[in-house]
Image (spheres, rainbow, N blue to C red):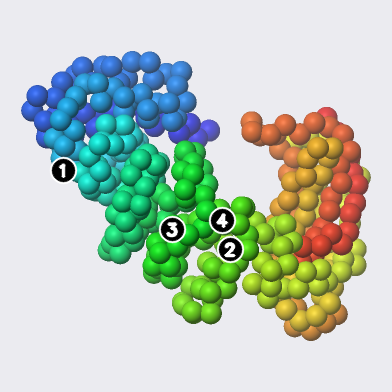
Amino acid sequence: MAQPLKELVNAASVGVLADALAAGLPAFARERFVHEAVTGLGPLELKDRVRHVATTLDQVAGPPFPDVAAALRAAAPTFDMWSGWPATDYVALAGLGHLDVAMDTLAAITPHATAEFAVRPFLERHGRTALEIMYGWAGSADEHLRRLASEGTRPRLPWATRVSWLMEPGPTLPILDRLRDDPSEYVRRSVANHVNDFTKGHPEAAIALLAGWRASGGSHVEKVVRHAVRGLLRDGHPEALGLVGARAGGGAVESLTLAAPRVAVGEKLPFTVVVTASEPGPVVLRYAVCRQGSRRVFHLGERVAGAAGESFSVTRSHSFRPVTTRVEPPGPRTLEVMVNGVIRATATFQLTP
C-alpha cells in the first residue's frame, strides 16, 4: 500500500527545512524548531501538518521576515515538495506585509515545491499589484514559474481559498494569452484547467476566449481547447461541441448491451455500445450512472466518422469498487449513453451487496 501523502511531512522533511534555516540564520534555534514542529504531527491531516510546521517556523524564527526569506531563497534548491511546502506556507503567513520580498521568495522555491496555494493570500490582499508580478512570471524561462502564474490565479484552484475578484473572467486573461501556446505541456495543461474553471460559471466567455485562440492559431491550440471544454462536453453544451467539430446529438445508439442485469459492490459491469454517426465528423461519447439523487458522468470515447452511417462499437467496464470519498448503496441503477451531448440509450441494472 502506498504511503499516505500526509506522512511525507515528517521529521525528515522538517529536518531539511531546519538545516536550511540554520545555514542562513546563525541565531536560528534549530533544535527547538524541530522538536516543536514534529510534536503533534501524528493525528494531523496533510494540510494541517503543513500549516503546523509553518506556524512553528513563524514562532521560532520570529522577525525580521526579510532575513528569514533570504535564508529560504538561498536554500531553495535543497527543498522538495514536503520540505518546501511548509516554507511557502510560512511566506504566506509571515510575509503579507512584504510583497516584493515574499513574491521573490515564492518564485525561488516554486521550481522545487509549488507555491500555488501560498500566492492566494497575496492576491487577496494586494490585488492587481500581486497579479502584475505574476504576469512577469509568465515570461520566465522556468516552466514551473510560468505554470505558477496560471495555476496560482485559477478561479477554482482545488484545495485553495477562493479569491473573489478572480472568479470573473478578465483579470487573468493577459497571463493566459501569454501562456496559451507555451512549449511546456505542464504549463498548457494549467492554462486549460484555468479556462475550464471559467466554464463552470461563465461558459459563454470561456468559449469566446477559446474560439479567439483557435482563430489566432498556435502549435498546441487544439489540445488546449479540448481539455478546457471537457466539462462542457460532458454536459452536452452545443457551442462546446461545435468547438471540437461535433454537432449536438449527431448520432444514434444502435444497441446498448449490459454483460449482466446485476453487479455486486466491489465488482465491474462490462457493457457494449454500438453507435452510428449521422454525419461525418467527431462523435463524442459519454455515459452516466444514475440512482436516486445522484448522476455521475464519465468519458466513454471519441471517434471521427468519415461518412454518415458509419458505425463503431465501444466496450467499457464500470467499476463499483468502494472508495473512501463515495458511498455506493445497493439498489437500482440506470446507465445512460450520450452521443454528442444527447441521451440516446438507457439500460437498467441492479447493484447488489
Query: Which amino acid, by three-letter code, is at mark 1?
Result: Ala
Residue 206, image quadrant? bottom right
CA distance for labels 4 and 3:
11 Å
Mark 1 = which residue?
74
Q: Secondary structure at mark 2?
A: helix
Residue drawn at the location 35% of the way across and 52% of the way down: 128
The quadrant of the picture occupied by the C terminus is top right
Mark 2 = which residue?
205
Choose the circle earlier in sequence order: 4 or 3.
3
Q: Residues within 10 Å of mark 4 (few under 14, many from 20)?
A: many
Left of 323 or right of it: where is 224?
A: left
**Which numbered tag is attached to residue 198?**
4
Choose the circle earlier in sequence order: 2 or 3.
3
Q: Secondary structure at mark 4?
A: helix
**Which numbered tag is attached to residue 209?**
none
Left of 223 or right of it: where is 46?
A: left
Between circles 3 and 1, the one closer to the viewer is: 3
Residue 117, image quadrant? top left
Q: Nearer the viewer, residue 64 or 252?
A: 64
CA distance for labels 2 and 4:
8 Å
Residue drawn at the location 37% of the way across and 55% of the way down: 149
Query: Which amino acid, by three-letter code, is at mark 2?
Result: Ala
Residue 36, image quadrant? top left
**Which numbered tag is attached to residue 172?**
3
